[in-house]
Image: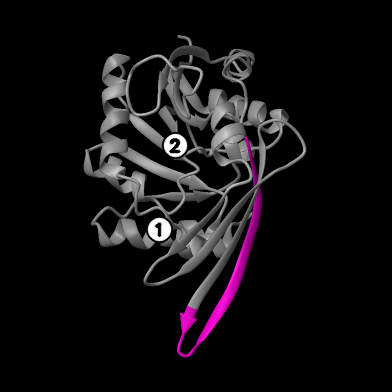
Amino acid sequence: MAYSAFARYYDSLTRNIDYDAVAGHLCDAMKRLNHKPGLTLDLACGTGSLTVRLAERGIDVYGLDASPEMLSIAQRKASAAGHPLFFICQKMQEMDLAGKVDTVICILDSINHLISPEDVLRTFRQVSRFLNPGGFFLFDVNTLYKHCFVLKDHTYVYDLEDIYCVWQNINARGKGRIGISLDFFERRGSVYIRSSERFYERAYPIKALLAMLKSAGIQPAAVWRGMDFSPPGPRTQRVLIAAEKPE
């Protein structure tokens, strides 16, 4: 899935995300883990907004994403910010790096885009393969609660100055799996041009994710709720998981 149409409008639809706060939260998490980021991979980096914020904090970071359209935007964004960063076009579950890294981050529910447990485990194994001993993997996911009770069967409308978008979530074939339908309407002169994107997201039980991390050779170290460091509860919508590659 290239997310080619989605890439053009992604930044407009995610204006509500405070990437500076996300970058700060990740840095605070690493301090709590007594971990220095070192060489860092931003896995599923999208249009590079977080990658650039991490670089601005002095982190030696590069990005990886499966969408060439997303990465084209990321490259331009990084250059404009004065950080000509390196980006790789690969799928998460097939990533093949030139060397090992000290930290892997994967933020904004990118793991939820892997709709089979086999692909999640393959991704975790590739992370383990390229993570230095003592290195950390930090990723967040939408929870089963969010998919089943917040997102399921809801429709959202974004009426922005540059784009009109209808976002529909449909419960699809099993608990935690959501079908997402995006229809974009962009004004060009006196007409609107329509483009569409279709994909799925899936939420996994936290225990299942922790078991897959262990199976991949990465030891879970912490599970936190959203953007704070408290334990998740039954109605938590997003969790941040930290796991360490054993020495």
- The x, y position of residue 29, in whole percent, is 31, 22
Specify few, some or many for label 1: CA neighbours under 10 Å numbering under 14, 14-19, or 20 or more. Answer: some
Instruction: Depth check: give the residue in front, 60 or 206.
Output: 206
Q: Main secondary structure of the magenta part?
A: strand
In this rendering, position of residue 144 left or right of residue 244: right
Three-letter code, disc 2: Ile
Q: Quadrant of the C terminus?
A: top left
- The x, y position of residue 109, in whole percent, is 51, 37
Specify few, some or many for label 2: CA neighbours under 10 Å numbering under 14, 14-19, or 20 or more. Answer: many
Q: Name the residue tied to disc 2.
A: 107
Image position of 7 with respect to 171: above or below: below
CA distance separating discs 2 and 1: 15 Å
Callout 2: helix, strand or loop?
Answer: loop
Instruction: Depth check: give the residue in front, 10 or 216.
Output: 10
Quarter of the image where one finds residue 172 = top right
Write down the region rendered in magenta: 187-202
Q: Name the residue tied to disc 1.
A: 11
The residue sitting at 62% across, 60% down in the picture is: 197
**Going from the N terminus, do you reach mark 2 or mark 1 first?**
1
